[in-house]
Each structure stands twice: as C-alpha cells, then as structure tokens.
Image: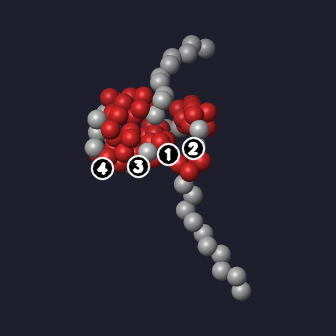
C-alpha cells in the first residue's frame, strides 16, 4: 500500500511575479472582507520576504507577522506601508 503525504497549501509559493501578486491583491480587494485583505497582504509579504518587507516598513519582523495575522486589527498606516513595500498602491476609480 502506498502512503500519500498531504501538505498544507501555501499561496505564497505561487505569488512569484508582480502580475500574479497584483491579480491576487486586486481580487481580494474587490471581493474580500477586511480580514481577507489583511491575510492577503501577509501572503504577499511572505512571498516577497518578510525580513525585506519589515525593513522597508520600519516594523520588526515579529511585529509584521503579528500585524498581518488572522484576527489582527492593524492600523491603516501599517496596511499602507506594507502595500507600498510590496509594490502596490491604492487608487480610486469612479464607475
């Protein structure tokens, strides 16, 4: 009998280029709730390198993990810093 190994899915492993990251963040921003957006930023930060993002935002690495974890309520300033550090920006488009 063959034993199958199941591993936990980690989306950060698939966020390997700018267009994939932009598509992922835009989808979550359009369809997700606040907690989903915070979690998505955490995935992108992990994909880009938490140490690098922590350095660019001026946050400690553990502080960054805490701010982007499920159930956290980071300040808007923190969200903007992380978004900019991963190469994103907010734009308002009228419809």
Of the two numbered discs 1 and 2 on the same chain, state the one appearing first in sequence.
2
**Pointers 1 and 3 in contact (CB under 8 A)?**
no
Q: CA distance from mark 1 to mark 4?
A: 16 Å
Tell me if mark 4 has few (under 14), some (14-19) or many (20+) residues whose alpha carbon lies within 10 angstroms of its own: few
Q: Which residue is mark 4?
A: 62
Secondary structure, mark 3, is loop
Q: Which residue is mark 3?
A: 70
Considering only vertical position in the picture, is 6 above or below 40? below
Of the two numbered discs 1 and 3 on the same chain, state the one appearing first in sequence.
1
Q: Which residue is mark 1?
A: 47
Tell me how many marks there are: 4
Quarter of the image where the N terminus is located: bottom right
Q: Which residue is mark 2?
A: 15
Question: Which residue sits furthest bottom?
Answer: 1
The percent position of residue 22, horizontal first and vertical second, equals 57, 32
Which residue lies at the image location 70% right of the left edge and 82% below the top edge? 2
Of the two numbered discs 1 and 4 on the same chain, state the one appearing first in sequence.
1
The percent position of residue 7, horizontal first and vertical second, equals 57, 66
**Pointers 1 and 4 in contact (CB under 8 A)?**
no
Secondary structure, mark 4, is helix
The percent position of residue 10, horizontal first and vertical second, equals 54, 54
Of labels 3 and 4, the one closer to you: 4
Q: Is residue 73 left or right of residue 95?
A: left
């Amino acid at each position: 009998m063959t034993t199958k190994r199941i591993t936990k899915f980690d989306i950060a492993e698939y966020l390997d280029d700018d267009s994939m990251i932009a598509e992922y963040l835009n989808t979550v921003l359009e369809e997700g709730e606040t907690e989903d957006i915070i979690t998505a930023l955490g995935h992108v930060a992990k994909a880009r390198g938490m140490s690098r993002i922590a350095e660019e935002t001026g946050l400690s690495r553990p502080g960054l993990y805490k701010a982007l974890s499920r159930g956290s309520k980071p300040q808007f300033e923190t969200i903007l810093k992380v978004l900019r550090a991963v190469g994103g920006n907010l734009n308002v488009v009228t419809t």
